[in-house]
Each structure stands twice: as C-alpha cells, then as structure tokens.
Amino acid sequence: MAFPTLSTLPLITPFEETASLDPVIRSQSEAGYEQTRPRFTRVPEKWHIEYGDLSDADYTALKAWELATKYGADLDTWIHPKTAASHNVRLASPIKYKLNQTDSIWTAVFDLKEV
C-alpha cells in the first residue's frame, strides 16, 4: 500500500528534514584537536511531518496506511511534497493523532526514516 494521497499538504513550518544518524565519527585529542572520518557511505534522511487540517477521510486513509505498514515494521514509498522525489521509508514511531472536536479536524504528527 502506497502512502495515501491526502487532501492537504503538510504544514510547512514544522516540516523538518535531517540525517537519521550522525554520519561522522569524531575523536577528540587532549590538545583540543578533533579527528573526523565518515561513518557511512550513505546517509539516510529523516523527516518530521505534521498535518494540521485532516478530514475524517484523510484520518481514515492515514490510519489504514499506518496499519498496512505495521506501524513501521514494513517499508513503503513516500513522495516528498516539495521536491517530488521518491523515497523508501518507514515510520520511526506510531503516528500521533489529535482531534479538534469543535471542527472535526484531525492533526497527525510523525517521523519517516529513509531505508
């Protein structure tokens, strides 16, 4: 099951993109110098994503995707909303959902890790 197409884009402000692991091994010397070398030949990325205006249908689709990927046990293809690049990802942890009961609007916050 591919990442669902939702009726809204992620909020731009909390959208964060980082390396999923520190890609450098650092060794400090007693004189204050630092030696460094690469830890990996490839550096997987990690994205922190927040959707703020999800309808009930979007919530249901995202929940079904989370269940289909076994809460991060299986990987899936995700299309970056800004660059349109395709990435093989998995959930870093279960999605956090929050319901605004006055508007019946959902918020979903989660991290995706490149594999």
Image: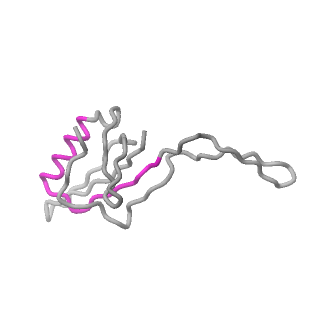
Relative to 10, is 43 above or below? above
Seen at 38% across and 49% down, the residue is: 111
- Toward which corner of the image does residue 69 lie, by quadrant? top left
The N terminus lies in quadrant: top left
Residue placed furthest toward the bottom: 13
Which residue does the image show at 76% across and 48% down from the upper left? 35
Reply yes or no: does residue 92 show up in magenta.
no
- The residue located at (35%, 59%) in the rendering is 83
Is 36 on the left-hand or right-hand side of 59?
right
Quarter the C terminus occupies: top left
Q: Nearer the viewer, residue 88 or 103?
A: 88
Check residue 60 for magenta coloring. yes
Front in this rendered view, residue 95 or 19: 19
Where, by quadrant of the figure, is residue 7 drawn?
Answer: bottom left
The answer to whether 112 is drawn above or below residue 102 in the figure is above
The percent position of residue 93, horizontal first and vertical second, equals 37, 42
Left or right placement of residue 63 versus residue 110 in this view: left
Residue 47: x percent and y percent? 41, 52
Q: Name the colour scheme.
A: one colour
Spot occupied by residue 44 in the image (x, y as percentages of width and height): 48, 44
Going by the picture, which residue comes out furthest to the right? 31
115 and 64: which is toward the camera: 115
User: Viewed as shown, does residue 47 lie left or right of 64?
Assistant: right
Q: Give the range drawn in magenta.
A: 45-68
